[in-house]
Amino acid sequence: MLILFNTLISGRLTIFGAVVLAGISFWYASFAYAETLKFRVDGSFDWDGRGEVNATLRHEGINGKFYVADDYWNSLGFRERDILSADVEELSNQFDTVIYPGLVSVFGSENKPGVDGNSKITVLMTKMIDGAGGYFREQDGFLKSLYADSNEREMVYLNAAYSYSERMRSFLAHEFQHLITFNQKTIKHNVQEEVWLNELRSEIAPTLVGYDGAFVYTNSNLEARTKSFMKNFSDAILNWEAEEKDYASINLFGQYVLDHYGRSVIASMTENNLVGIESFNAALRVFGFSEEFADVYTNWTIANLVNSCEVEPINTYCYNNPNLKYSDIHVTFSGSGVESDTVSSERSTEDWRSFWFEFETGLKNERPADHIFRFDFFAPQNSKFRVPYVTYGSDGLKVKETGEIEINSGSGSFYIKNFGFDTSRIVIIPSNQAQYRGGLGRGNSTRYNFNAATITDFELSSGSTTLPFSILGGNEKALLPNLADGTLIRASNDYKVYVINGRYKRWIQSAEIFNFYGHFSFAAVSEVSPETLDLYEDSWLVRADSDTKVYEINGDGTRHWLDMSAEEFLIRGRKWDMVRVINTSELNWYVEGPAVR
C-alpha cells in the first residue's frame, strides 16, 4: 500500500511519500526475521485478562531487549507503528544512559547475568488496564521447575498504551528498581522486602535519575502523585492496597526521606539483610541519625501541614525539592466546621494513617475569659498513639509552636493559653503507630476519641480541671513524693490500699483485684503518712482496655456507665485525666449498676 503524506513548507506543497515509504520498507526489512516469543503475563493487568501473549523483539539496546505484544502492534496503523518504534528506541536509550547507570549506582545491580544467562533485561510492552503503568513478577527470576509460569529471565512489564507519555521512562525506572530489590533482598539475603518500602524506593527512582527535576516536572510522575496526594492526605502507608492513594502517599513520604536523609540512607536500606521498619531504622543508625522510623513519620505528618523549613527545628517540617513548595503541597481544611465551645469526636483509624484536626476561633481585642484551649485524648491502653500539634498566631498562617502531647496508657491532655487572643488556630495530628510489619490490604482499626473545649481561669482555680505542671510552673509537682505510676500505698493509720497514677490515687476495693494483676502483691504496698496520701486526688473513673466506655466506680463495689456526652462529662465537674484504664477482669468484678445520665 502506498501512503502519501503532505506538508506545507514556506507556502509550497511538498510531497515526500516515497521517502517515508522507503523508511517503512527498510524498517520492516530489518526486522523481517525478528525474534518472536510467547510470554506469560499477569491476567489481572492485561487488557483482555489473558495469561500469555506473543511478542516480537522491536529494539535491542546495551542493557535491555524491548518486545512489543504482536496483537497490540498489529492494531496500529503504519504511522502509529513508526511512532511507537521511535518511542521504544528513545526509551531504550534512556534506559542505557540514564535509568540503568543511575539506579545501579544507588541500589546495586539486578541479578546479572541472571536465570537466563543473558546480561540484558527483557522489557515486555503490552496493552494493560487503565491506570496501570507496569508491573514486575518475581517468579520470572526462577526456573520453570520452581515456578511453572516463569518466563525464566530478568524482566519487567510496561503498558504499551503509555509509550507516548513522559511518564513512560518513570514507569521503567519504577519497575527496574523492583528487579534490583529482588536481587538485593530475595536472591542475596533470602528475605522478602515489605511492599510499602519496596514501593517507596520505586516511587523515588525517577527522582533519583532526574526525571522529577525543575525543568522536567510538568507531566512528570511526581507531579501526578502530588496532585493525587492533595486529594487524599490520609493513607495507611504500611498497608498496601495498590491504589492511587497508596502510590501518592508513599511517594511523598519517600521524597521527604530523600530530602532529609539522603540517597545513601535509602541505598543502605536496600543493602542490609533486614526488611521494613527494621531495615529503615538500621540504615538511619549506620549514618548516625538519632531518629527512628516513628520520628521520621511523625515529622512528615507535620511537614505536610506546615511545609516551611523556617519553623523550629529548622529544616525539619518541609520538603527541600523545589517542586514541592508550600504552594504545591500542604494540608488544607474544608469549611464545614462545627462552631461550639466544646467539640467531641469518636473515630477509628488504621495504624500509620494520620488525620489533621483543625480548631479555629475568631480573635478578640482583649483576652476572652475562656482563653484556655484544652484537649483530651483517649485510646486503648495498648495502642501507641503519637499526637503532635501545631499552633498558629493571629494571622492564622505563621506557626507559633510545634509540640507533641504526652500520651500515657493511651490517654493524654494538653493546654494552650490565649486561644482567641494571640492564638487563632490549633491543629492536632493523631496517628497510631503500633503496627510493626507491613501488610497487604486494609489493616486493623483502633478506636479513639477526643474532647476539645475552651475553659476559663475560674474553672482552673475552682479545681474543675487539672493543668499539667508545665503550665502551673512546677510548684504542685514539688509537693508530691517521687512515686512511680503503679506504686501501691496505704496510710499508716488505714487498711485501704491505693494504686498511684500521676497525681491520682485509686482505691483497690478487694484483695481479689490483686489477683487480676501479676505485679500486684501486698508485700509491695508502701506505707505513707496520712498527709502524704491526702496530696493525691481520688480517682473513681475507669474504662476497660480496648473500650471507650467510661464507668464511675462506687465504694459499694458497683460500676455505673456514664451515658452522657463529653460536654456533659465536663460540665458536671468530672475530669478526663482522672480516667484510669483497667483490665476486663477487674471491670467485671464490679457489679453493673444503673447508668448515670
Image (tube, rainbow, N blue to C red):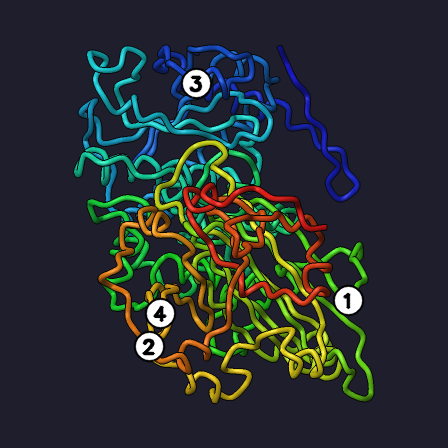
Q: Earlier in the sequence, mark 1 or mark 2?
A: 1
The residue identified by callout 1 is 341
Q: Give the Cα separation between the discs numbered 3 and 2.
A: 72 Å
Q: Which of labels 1 and 4 is toward the front? A: 4
SS category of the residue bearing label 1: loop
Would you call the spot at circle 1 few (<14 residues within 10 Å), some (14-19), or many (20 or more)? few
Q: Quadrant of residue 149?
A: top left
Q: Secondary structure at mark 3?
A: loop
If you read the primary sequence from the N terminus, does the residue marked by circle 3 or circle 2 appear first? 3
* Tag 3: amino acid: Asp
Q: Nearer the viewer, residue 385 or 48?
A: 385
Label 4: which residue? 490
**The one of 285 and 64 positioned closer to us in this rendering:** 285
Write down the residue under mark 2. 528
How many numbered circles are shown? 4
Identify the amino acid type marked 1: Asp
Q: CA distance from mark 1 to mark 4?
A: 40 Å
Residue 98 shows in this picture:
yes
Q: Residues within 10 Å of mark 3 (few under 14, many from 20)?
A: some
Mark 4 near mark 2, Cβ–Cβ under 8 Å?
yes
The secondary element bearing badge 4 is classed as strand
Q: Nearer the viewer, residue 351 or 286?
A: 351
Q: CA distance from mark 4 to mark 2?
A: 6 Å
Vertical placement of residue 526 versus 568, above or below: below
Residue 73 placement (x, y as % from top left): 52, 17
Question: Disc 3 marks which residue?
Answer: 42
Q: Position of residue 289 (x, y in %)?
A: 30, 68
Query: Callout 2: few (<14), some (14-19), or many (20+) C-alpha neighbours within 10 Å?
Result: some
